Amino acid sequence: MARGIARAVSFGGRATAGWCSYRRITVAVCLGNLVAALLVLRSLTAPGSFAPTAPNRGGGGVVQYTEEQIKRVEESIRIRREAEPVELVQAVKKLRKVFAREEKRRKELPLVLKQKISYDILQRLQDLGDNGSLAQQREIVESWRTEKLKDIKSASTQNQSNLDLSRLLKRALEFNWHMLMEDIGLWIPEEVTHTVHDDKPENEPEEEEIIAGPPLSPQCNAELHTDYDGAAVRWGLTHHKESAADCCQACLDQAKNAKPGELKCNIWVYCPSEFGCFSPDKYEHKHQECWLKQADHPKLNFKDKYSESYRDAHPTAPVVVPWMSGVISA
């Protein structure tokens, strides 16, 4: 079934729930507040409110108020009357008239006719199929409405009852279309278009990636998304360092303390990714691996991104090279 129309077949439930619409609840709350305010105002302005009977002491009597007290009471009554929400009362009355007209128009179309409208539209949407977009669904519904209006206007009906029914349907399709859609339970959501705005100036340099750990020495010549080749001086699978700076320092220390005849480290390769780093060999390279290498003429294995052809041959390869490396300066 097409998206956005699942409620079309159960229009009866939507129609019977009309009394619980947001507008009706709002009006009901306003009316309740208004009635409560009027009752309080009436109790305060009633003549007997300010002339209580004195306690019965044999003869009885009425409490006498001073002239100043009576003036204050009259002033209070005047203020309350001026504060009466006259505009709100008028607005509520207008809303009641509008809702009454809408309710009358809702009831004018027979239930059988509403069912027929619902099934006609549903059939057209079914013909569209499950892959139809929201825009196509709205176009089909609007096309059905336009065709139905043309049929009504061009039809010549002699039967008076049919003529009256056609007029009601014409008015519903022209002026109360959204209300009719609500009655039959037809709702098609709006399409949300997400546009990514790139307001970055053309000549502005890219933001540098943050490298965890202490800052690297200029001697390290660190390069992000880079993997250098070379003979292994220290096997990275069993040699982990907390940071890239520590890995570079390990290379410097090894070169400084190497014995005669031993390879001296001049390349360090570090895995900064918490998810590990890809390599085409059979090993699983984990976070914080630190490879110490040596090459008389350092050569790049990979830089920045793996090529599309390489990723075709190695399906597990990511797009960006995860390693970072550096060639130690003399």
Image (cartoon, grey):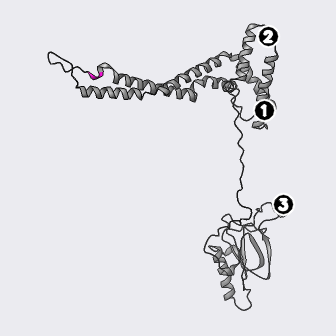
Q: Which circle marks residue 312 in the picture?
A: 3
Mark 1 and mark 3: Cα distance apart in space: 42 Å
Place of residue 319 in the rendered image (x, y in percent of width and height, measured from the top left)? 77, 62
Q: Which circle marks residue 3 in the picture?
A: none
What segment carries the magenta color? 49-53
- Of tags 1 and 3, which is closer to the observer? 1
Q: Secondary structure at mark 2?
A: loop
Amino acid type assigned to the residue bearing label 3 in the image:
Asp
Position of residue 41 in the picture relative to residue 240 (left or right): left
Query: Going by the picture, which residue comes out furthest to the left?
Result: 58
Which residue in the structure is indicated by mark 1?
Answer: 139
Mark 1 and mark 2: Cα distance apart in space: 29 Å
N-term mark: 1 or 3: 1
N-term mark: 3 or 2: 2
Amino acid type assigned to the residue bearing label 1 in the image:
Glu
Place of residue 33 in the rendered image (x, y in percent of width and height, measured from the top left)? 45, 27
N-term mark: 1 or 2: 1
Q: Which quadrant holds residue 179? A: top right
| Front position in the image: 174 or 89 | 89
